[in-house]
Amino acid sequence: MKYVFIIAGVLLIALSIAAGLIWVERRLLSVWQDRLGPNRVGPFGIGQVVADTIKLFFKEDWVPPFSDRPVFVLAPGILMATILLTFAVIPFGPNFVVFDSNIGILFFLGNSSLGVYSIVLGGWASNNKYSLIGAMRASAQMLTYEVFMGLSLMGVVMMADSFSFYKIVEAQKGAWFFIPQFVGFIVFFIAGIAETHRLPFDIPEAEGELVAGYHSEYSGMKFGMFFVGEYLGITLISGIIATLFFGGWLGPSFLPPVFWFLFKTFFFICVFILLRASLPRPRYDQLMELGWKILLPLSLLNLLITGAILIFLK
Amino acid sequence: MDQKNPNIISELKSRFDEKVILYYQQTIDSTPTLWLDRNNLIEVLKYLKYEITNPYTLLYDLTAIDERVRRKRNGQPESDFTVVYYLTSFERNSDLRLKVALKNGILSLPSITSVWESANWYEREVFDMFGIDFSGHPRLTRILMPKTWKGYPLRKEHPARATELEPFVLTDAIRDEEEANLKFSPQEYGLATESDDSDFMFLNIGPQHPGTHGLLRLIVQLHGEDIVNVIPDIGFHHRGAEKMGERQSWHTYIPYTDRIDYLSGVMNNHAYLLSVEKLAGIEVPDRASMIRIMMSELFRIASHLVWLGTFAQDMGQLSPVFYTFNDRERIFDIVSSITGGRMHPSWFRIGGVAHDLPDGWDKPMQTFVNYLPKRLKEFDNIIIKNRIFKARTIGIGVYTAKEAVDWGITGSGLRATGFNWDYRKKRPYSGIDKLEFDIPLGKNGDCYDRALVRMEEMRQSLRIIQQCIDNMPSGHFKSDHPLAIPPRKAKTMTDIETLINHFVGVSWGPVIPAGEAMVPYEGAKGGNGYYLISDGSTSSYRSRIRTPSFPHMQMLPLIAKGYTIPDLLAILGAMDFVLADLDR
């Protein structure tokens, strides 16, 4: 019974954050862009979330006749499923985790690799040239960034001596890992942006170039799943950054641990949005170059040095 | 400037023979206008471009005139259709207009694409509008009108209004024909479908696409994401502005000009009126001239702000477009307090401007001039100096000054290559030579330099506006010339002549004396100009609008080949074109 509550709680928090982000992002962007943003529906326009969701539900759910129908329908589901599954291993607080796996980080990396299928298949099944280009870009980008996304976390794993998110948080009671693992944090953060394909790394979507990239042909709730999936992805990456590098639920005890976790997560979500408001988009070959030539060597170096120091200390 | 006594005639005569110039036509704009024989056209053009000292390197314009119902030709050689070539020599700082007569139903000329590649689109336009054939043209098809269009719109017999035609009915046959015509076939554009080792992908960017800034279609031939070739397909925004000029009176055409380059409002009025006033021989009072300069420069800033914001957006930067549009809104606030309009105030009049400046006009203007430099500095920091932005624009879409001139590039795009040419300095109009400003130049001719040049141009425009605020002369805001309509209302109450002029001017519009004139104008996007022909009537006989975006877009394939799709967007963004300016 306890698990049912935890699962329901995690799902509720994750989905409501993701949906709420639609409004948060639009309001925050408009603050940074000298305009008002949605402020009409309800207090501060917060009802916009409901209005947007209702709109998405009632839109015609059109499947293009030239598409590969089963794959086209399946693709957005894969994205939602992989991201939501990953939330199972994230500890929201002490004893507030669905499934404290001893391979938590591997589970997350595996799921994020599966998530690429959603985009590639969606782009491919759309049978549209823009979608195809978007899907190809996505697969190249994800392949590049997954390599050192995993590597950048290995420093943390070595320091905590565990793949379990829960244990990693507990290992940070002395000092949060972003201090010793600063390089790992930066590399993971950049990889995380690429993983969620947000500006400046929204190359698979690249509005000005590819219309809407891989989800050009999607409408209605299928588009909605990509849309919410993107926000879920941001929430997830922010949550993982908070967990692995900023002590997860740890914090002064005058507030409950869940609050600290959500607070840290929300902070990184805002950083994601701020990045979107401020940076232009590099060309995809420049992105690859950054990945292979700078970030990969950097994460390897970080791994080596962390390992050397740990051995030296033992 | 030795335009009054051109030695070009003697140079031509000594190179060829006495008969090379069939007729020397006097024009009001004192541009030497020479009638040539069709047989030695290419030779003369080659001589003018390559051999002559101080050559005529720029093909500024190429167009045609339907002469069949023109009454006051004043001894010009007989002609049904006249093709006009307008050349510019930078070294001489002088223009040359060459005309070739076509008559007796033989509507064919040799194509000059072998001399100027930029003639390609111009000749297609003449073919499209007049049905004149150019032999040896690489692909002579319609350019602005749809493929299925019947007739040649700028011929005098072609109707200008829908009410002159039968009611339109979309039958199945018409629909099928139109749909069949929309089918894309690479062969039609001379594009190969495969290389030795792979198939090409044809990507249709536009006419509806977020990156094309309007109704523009680009057919992109791709190898992976590398651009093998790109073919612009234009004409979706064609509104027959030149044809309208033949129907509207000289005065009522002014609002149409606003909508040519719709981002630079009164600058279009300015370019048009310079030609009209030249034809009419109207001297514009100093105050009116300076008001015009001030408003034009204000609109140059407005246009550049839109360019800056959308360019950054093309690079994926979301925010600057809001900042620049907000600042543009400040300009529109000033514009509306002075003119009553915003984007298209249509506020200039023949012989001056519509009203005098309102009391206290200088305060908001001064506030803006003080405010903008700080913002420009911010834009420099968030856009121009951004490292990703630099990585996206430096070394992208490069062309040399020679290529630029060959392809008819003017304005910031030309100056970004380091070529110093600005009509405000070289052919000063409206007394702009009395004001101090610099012409910013680039070095490399890439997208980044084009951005730098435009940023600096905004600062220079502010300098000009500041001098206008400080030195605004007193006097009339409109000329007393009888053709400047309508004459001042107050005077009509005391003077019967003025009353008659007022009445005629308001009910018919002014009758501009017969003649031809074109005044090159430094628009926000490049060289603009209205080639107006009056037949001594209340409306123009032919209004040719030379717009900068047209040749700029024509050059796209040359500068986009070998780059990738994101670069194509950067090149388009840096080009700063406006679709209405392209299609008219």
Image (cartoon, rainbow, N blue to C red):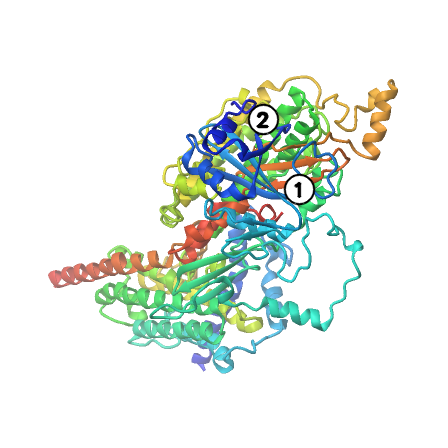
- In the image, taking residue B12 as reference, residue B101 lies left or right, namely right
Name the foreground residue: B320 vs A306: B320
Determine the secondary structure under disc 1: loop
List x then y, in percent, for residue B527: 54, 37
Name the foreground residue: B545 vs A253: B545
Give a yes or no on whether discs 1 and 2 share a subunit. Answer: yes
List x then y, in percent, for residue A293: 25, 58
| Quadrant housing the C terminus of chain A | bottom left
Rendering quarter of residue B474: top right
Query: Is tag 1's residue or tag 2's residue first in the polypeptide sequence?
Result: 1
Chain letter of the residue carrying label 2? B
Q: Is residue B160 above or below residue A49?
A: above
Q: Which mark is residue B79?
A: 1
Measuring 59% from the left and 75% from the top, which residue is drawn there?
A: A62
Q: Is residue A275 above or below residue B194?
A: above
Amino acid, disc 2 = Tyr
Alpha carbon separation for disc pair 1 and 2: 33 Å
Chain letter of the residue carrying label 1? B
Figure disc tally: 2
**Residue B378 appears in view:** no
Q: Which mark is residue B429?
A: 2
Measuring 38% from the left and 54% from the top, which residue is drawn there?
A: A282
